[in-house]
Structure formats: C-alpha cells, structure tokens
Image (cartoon, helix red, strand yellow):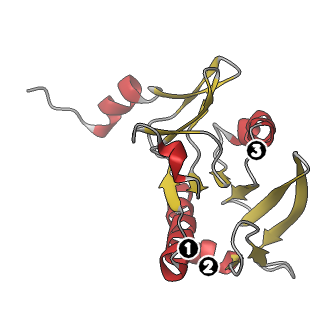
Amino acid sequence: MENFAYDNYLPEYEEIDYELIGGEKFYMSAAAPNIPHGLVIIRIATIFTNYIDKTEIQARVLGDNVDVYFSDEDHFKPDVSVVSDLSIFGDGKRIYGAPDLIVEVLSDLTKDNDSGIKKDKYEQYGVKEYWIVDPKEKSIKVYNLVESKFKYIDEYKINSNKTKIKVSIFDNLLVDVHEVFKWWL
C-alpha cells in the first residue's frame, strides 16, 4: 500500500470535481477552500435543518456533496440547497430539478461563476431564493424569484442596520447574520 502525505494528495486530486454549465466543465477544487467557507456552510445548513425539524415542514437540506441536475448541459454542486418537492430526489444519488433555495459561499475559485452565470442559470430554472455568501465581507446577498426573474432583495452584513434575513420560502424564519458568522465574531 502506498502512503500519501497531504501535499502529495492535493496535486493529483485537486481538480476532480466539476460543475457543468451550458455544457462546459467548470472545475472545482476537491480540497476545501478554507475553514471559514466550510463553517459558513455548516452554520447555514444547521439553521435551516433546525427550523425544518422544529416546524415539521416536509423539506430537506442538502450539502455540497449532492449534484443538482437541471438538464443534460447544466448540473451544479451548490453549497447548500433546500428542497420541499421530494419527488425531485429521483434515484437517491442526485436531485433532478430546482431546489427552493440555493446558497453559494464565495471562494476565490468560484466567486465569478457564483455571482454571474450560476445566478443566471438558477433564475432560468426557477430557484425561488438565492443567497450569495461572502465570508470575507461577512455578508449575504439575497435574491428572490419574482415573475421568473431574480429580484435583488438586499445585502445583509455584520455591523450594519440590516442583519436579519426573512427567508421567503418559509413562513416564520428570520436568519440573523450574526448566527451565520458566529464562528468569526
């Protein structure tokens, strides 16, 4: 059996993961972008999961290990997805169709796509709510689908007068950005 050190592992496996956007492969690093990126994903997924469990809503929270297939040419690996239509789970390996809410946490490798073409594709395929989270700025930009177009709602930031996000897909959930970025405060 061959032994590997972390530094040996990364070059061989760093770009094995990809998203397909408009039929073009966009590689993603298989290694975690950084600790804050991962912590933000966990915090947001936990907030949504706790709310769903408490209210007994029929929905699921998925992490970045689940492929979202919109079409043969468009499939993504969002950082967090919330799905209420359980019929789109299909074969149990991926989901086929639009989640209700998608969260992308910016990293140096993916920030342009997350804010650009992926936002456009999520809009095209009918994602109801889209969050773009910037761990460096400790901010969350929120978009809601209105008449088949994303409407920019606002940017919520630590140390601002806008810190509570009304989650449009749930009746009574307000997310405080301080809870999302709690690890950094």
Q: Quadrant of the N terminus?
A: top left
Please name the amino acid that badge 2 sits on: Glu
Q: Which mark is residue 126?
A: 3
Instruction: State left or right for residue 30 relative to residue 158.
Output: left
Rounded to the nearest whole Å, what is the CA distance between mark 3 and mark 2?
28 Å
Instruction: State left or right for residue 154 relative to residue 101.
Output: right
Q: Nearer the viewer, residue 127 or 56?
A: 56
Tell me what residue is drawn at x 83 percent, y 57 percent. Answer: 144
Crowd rating for badge 3 (residues with CA inside 10 Å; few <14, some 14–19, many 20+): many
Rounded to the nearest whole Å, what is the CA distance between mark 3 and mark 1?
23 Å
Residue 126 placement (x, y as % from top left): 76, 44
Residue 183 placement (x, y as % from top left): 54, 74
Please name the amino acid that badge 3 sits on: Gly
| Mark 2 residue element | helix
Residue 88 placement (x, y as % from top left): 54, 44
In contact (CB < 8 Å): disc 2 and disc 1? yes
Q: Is residue 33 visible?
A: no
Picture quadrant where residue 101 is located: bottom right
Label 2, on which residue?
Answer: 179
- In the rendered image, the vertical position of residue 15 relative to residue 7, given as above or below: above
Instruction: State left or right for residue 87 relative to residue 13.
Output: right
Tell me what residue is drawn at x 80 percent, y 60 percent. Answer: 142
Mark 3 against mark 1, which lies toward the viewer? 3
Mark 3 against mark 2, which lies toward the viewer? 3
Ranked by sequence position, the earlier of labels 3 and 2 is 3
Ranked by sequence position, the earlier of labels 2 and 1 is 1
